Amino acid sequence: METKPYTLPASFIDLLIDAVFAVDVDGRVLFASAACERIFGYTPQEMLGRVMFDMMVPQDRERTRQSVQQVMAGQPQLNFENRYIRKDGQIAYIMWSTRWSPPDQVRIGIARDVTQRKRAESKQAVLYAISEATSTAEDLPTLFQNIHQIIGTLLAVDNFTVALYDQESNKLSFPYHIDTMSETCIPVSALCEEVILNGQPLLLTSENMQDYLTEQQITVHNVPLCWLGVPLKSQNGTIGVLICKSYPGGTHYNEQDQELLQFVSTQIATAIERQQMQTRLQYMAQYDQLTTLPNRALLYDRLNVALLKARRERSHLSLLFLDLDKFKQVNDTLGHHVGDRLLQEVARRLKQCLRESDTVARVGGDEFVILLQPIPLPEHAALVKEKIRDALRPPISIDKHSLSIVPSIGIAHYPDHGDNEEQLLKYADQAMYAEKHGRPPQTLTAELGLTP
């Protein structure tokens, strides 16, 4: 039996689950099938004349332009994926199959909505990415930047903030804040405090934003279209809030977006706590806990770098070795708590005497080392020495005790008094003891085996 050919009516295209588009060389829609309304929220009539790039998530535009160039060069694209902002402001993930029609000078594309699949895939990918970011980030700012980029694979987050809550001080800080409208006056702290207090997400949309602000008696300019805050919870409680904002013309966040952010928030909280712990451990390894000055290990690192630079540039640097005369008597007669506060005040005054490029470190009980680099002439170190004496001359008042501190200070110059860390520190230390006991520093040159 002969099969009769069947001509498919053009209206049958509207029965397809996928949407069919025809766009011109500028990306302007010339034809859209009925399915576009289900996928994009716009009727076919509303789509006509629209530029597809204007509907696209900004982060996907450049990649899509490159794909379009390949299609127009005669290379059909199959299963190309990008994201669009629907009429209701939601993000739709689209998989395209596209080819170019040279006679008609149009691109023909079939769009399939893969939002649900992409969201499921993205959630798992995000968990893995956060875990990897935790292990590779060198510090908290880098971690926050990485988290912003990772969250951006789930949601449109041009405006993103990380707020951290310190339970001991009961204070909020905002170590990471990206906002495209810097003039926004919405009280972020108040909203974060509500999220932290209730331990629940807060989603403000175009439907409830103004009512909320009115209820809270808040008047602001540049009111966001949406504000989404999700608590960062860990075993130690709520440690902060993740915040996403969008302005008119941007993304409309909904409860599904809130669930996505909640899904990853616990792992983000764990990542932040882990990085905070690493930062604290690194700080403890490099800084003196009492005075917050660099310790001996960090001083050696900085001195090593300074010496490498000085050798390369044939420049000078100086070390000042300082200790406090009769400090032991303060501890013995007034107690260690007074001695500790005295050291803290000495550290504060020493820092005020130095430049940003200099380093003052606590290397022992009442011993401090100051690295001056670069220094034009050795004579300048003597000026710093006198500046320090002047800074320590005024009495220090602690618990109604007026304490007068006299320092002994030895100086070593590179390259005159040594070519490495050990030689310079030894010379400065001996020079300090020589001053303390009234010996002329010139005798050190022979004692330490240095050529005058």
Image: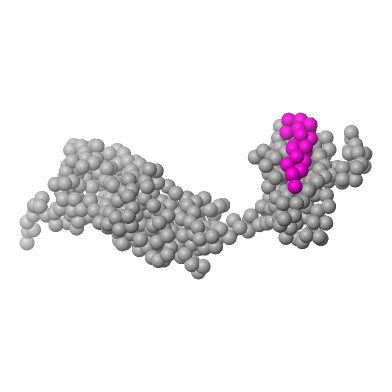
Which quadrant does the N terminus fall into?
bottom left
Q: Is residue 259 magenta?
A: no
Region of the chain picked out in magenta, as a range: 375-395
Residue at point 66%, 57% (across, down): 284
Q: Quadrant of residue 340?
A: bottom right
Q: Position of residue 270 (x, y in %)?
A: 50, 63
The reply to whether the magenta stretch includes residue 380 is yes
**In this view of the protein, which residue sits in the foreground, 142 or 390?**
390
Position of 100 relative to 277 (above/below): above
- Give the image location of residue 100, x and y in percent: 24, 41
**Can I make out residue 202 in this image?**
yes
Residue 295 position (above or below residue 121): above
Q: Is residue 78 visible?
A: no
Residue 370 is drawn in which quadrant? top right
Point 70% across, 45% down: residue: 349
Find residue 408 and report its horizontal and vertical position in percent. 82, 45
Residue 196 left/right relative to 438: left
The picture places residue 88, in percent across and down from the top left corner, at: 24, 53
Q: What is the chief secondary structure element of the magenta stretch? A: helix
Q: Residue at x 14, y 57 (%)?
A: 15
Q: Quadrant of the C terminus?
A: top right
